[in-house]
Amino acid sequence: MLWALSELMTDVNGSLLSNLRRPGNLGKPLMRGSSVDPHPLQVSPCPSPAAPSSLGSLANGTDCGQQILPPYGDTEKVIIGAILSIITLLTVSGNCLVMISVCFVKKLRQPSNYLIVSLALADLSVAVAVMPFVIVTDLIGGQWIFGQLFCNVFIAMDVICCTASIMTLCVISIDRYLGITRPLTYPVRQNGKGMAKMILCVWLLAASITLPPLFGWAKNINDGKVCLISQDFGYTIYSTAVAFYIPMSVMLLMYHQIFKTAKKSAAKHTFAGFPRPGDKRMSEAAKIGGKPRKESEECAHFARLLKNDRKNMSIFKREQKAATTLGIVVGAFTVCWLPFFILSTARPFICGTECSCIPLWLERTIMWFGYTNSLLNPFIYALFNRDLRTTYHNLLRCRYRNINRKLSAAGMHEALKLAERPELVL
């Protein structure tokens, strides 16, 4: 038996299946370790014994079908570590800028921006509490070296932070929709307490996905070398639906409604210009004999028309901006997270509930695509928020003094420009 196990461990690229059991010992279980172990090796039932992933797991002594890759070379470690570290540092920097900007700049301390702070906090937590451990694990080939207790803590932090980020994006899309469709009533009812309650609900719902594996419903997988979230069928369906599929459906619905509103507004609103042929005012002039109106009446009428059209254009531009912003947010969110959740949903049905038979490099690549969404969020919102852009610019150039006064002056200057040229609204 010991000879058979030695052959298995040293001849990974050879005929492993033929060495699993020697002739004459077909009815005896294979023992684990270099000394006699009274407990038989329990091979995971998820992939077939002939599958390469199962062979890889057996060769590394794991009970799970997930492969443990050999450590990278020095050059590969430097390149991969540098790329992943840059993603982590940029995520930390961008989300810290958001939180500092909203918390310390008076003009940005609005209830609607509390959601942006919650989003930044969730994304910052992903970068600080999750990404560093994933980087270390990836650089050593995927083997979990931080212990079984911390494996559960790590998975809990990963799930709650990523879920809170996704759900906050969903709530932001609802907030933007209500702000566009109810411009008169919604801002009045929007206050700090209401936003705080919404944020609390988001984090509690995220915790509802995190807690079940910690209290026995579905245990996480950790055999000493692999740290993997529970693959229980019921838990997988519940967690992926609440954490991704339902929020994504809501975001797509909100984007569709805002896009429809902007499209109707573009068709309905008329913009400043002189009376055109067929206009009602032209027909009224024709009825009175085609006599031209007095110059003063014409100017007064045109002034009223211009004032009304400025309002219409402002509404139209605001709706168009909201549709564009939400479209980019939804697009980035879907590209980053959809592959990960498709894989997470399908994995138990492909591999079973005891392991993962998906190649580790593929899992890690898709996972980092999801983490990248935490990097993109602060820059997407700054792209369409002039106050955030101005605050970023001042903070990065270490211009802390009088930043509130500068924003107020910039806002007043922008308002004067828009009063003269409303087409400049972004």
Image (cartoon, helix red, strand yellow):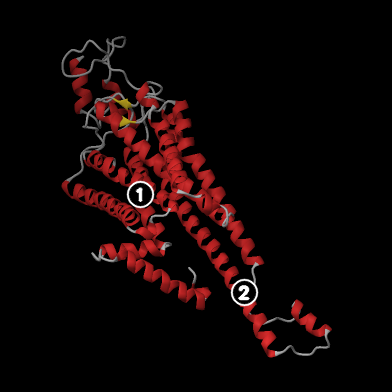
- Please tell me how crowded label 2 is: few (under 14), some (14-19), or many (20+) other residues with Cα within 10 Å: some
* Secondary structure category for the residue under label 2: loop
Instruction: State how many labels appear.
Output: 2
For image coordinates 60% across by 68% down, the residue present is 312
* Secondary structure category for the residue under label 1: helix
Image position of 304 with respect to 93: above or below: below
Q: Position of residue 306 (x, y in %)?
A: 61, 77
Image position of 265 with respect to 204: above or below: below
Q: Amino acid at mark 2?
A: Phe
The label on residue 271 is 2
Mark 1 or 2 closer to N-term?
Answer: 1
Image position of 129 with respect to 152: above or below: below
The label on residue 135 is none
Query: Mark 1 and 2 residues: CB-CB less than 8 Å, in contact?
Result: no
Alpha carbon of mark 1 to alpha carbon of mark 2: how far?
Answer: 39 Å
For image coordinates 47% across by 53% down, the residue present is 331
The label on residue 120 is 1
**Residue nearer the viewer, 79 or 121:** 121
**Residue nearer the viewer, 147 or 317:** 317
Image position of 9 with respect to 109: above or below: above
**Residue nearer the viewer, 117 or 143:** 117
- Please tell me how crowded label 1 is: few (under 14), some (14-19), or many (20+) other residues with Cα within 10 Å: many
